[in-house]
Amino acid sequence: MATRLLLLRHGRTDNPEQRCYGWRDVPLHPEGHQQMARCAARLRRMTLSAVAASDFTRTIASADYFARPRGLPVQTAPALREIHFGAIEGLTFAEVEARYPATAREWVATPATVRFPEGECFADVQARVIPWVTSWLYDWQDRTTLLVIHSGTTRALLQWMTGCDPQATLSIRIAYGDVFRCTQATPAGNWQLEQLPYGGTDWTPVPL
């Protein structure tokens, strides 16, 4: 048997000004609820042994569309949170440029290594996410489970699974409602990564 881990980005949030909201607890937009209902319908025949999410409203609400029909609880974990933007939480990019110009320049030039003031960098996200996921995979070996998370945490896990340059993960588009199917034939084996874009019809290999 194989271990399969599904990584789903939560639905669209209510954030019309496109503010940084890594650790801000913003709710799903009504369209986000519709997206998650459609995603859940598409995956309704897939057997899931467990469902987990970060401890934010947007991920918990998204995960509920998959857990409730299967009679499963949504397990929550702070370790699965999005990157912490620190002092720039709640700012637009224009405001970041005005108040933290050096951070804004570094964010554009080397997004895989920038550390946000009073916040995290990519490596910090991995430092909290990977131990949690390693334990989760041990508990659910040879099963299929779902994590409802964020684009940043998804990239952190994809890099860990493949060993690619962290910058390479930024070439992968991760839209609201996109799903990654990560399959490991043996506990020490390589991961096979496939992506099902929201609204797409086929799983395609992830080029990492």
Image (cartoon, rainbow, N blue to C red):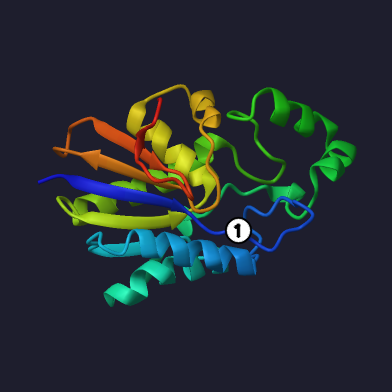
The residue located at (79%, 54%) in the rendering is 17
Q: Which residue is mark 1?
A: 12
The residue located at (52%, 54%) in the rendering is 81
Left or right: residue 145 versus residue 167 is left
The residue located at (40%, 36%) in the rendering is 158
Left or right: residue 99 versus residue 156 is right
Left or right: residue 18 versus residue 34 is right
Residue 119: x and y, percent? 65, 45
* Screen quadrant of the C terminus: top left
Residue 199: x and y, percent? 48, 50
In this view, the residue in front, 45 or 50, is: 45
Amino acid carrying mark 1 in the image: Arg
Query: Which residue is most to the right?
Result: 98
Q: Quadrant of residue 39?
A: bottom left
Instruction: State whether residue 125 is above or below residue 191.
Output: below
Residue 83: x and y, percent? 58, 47
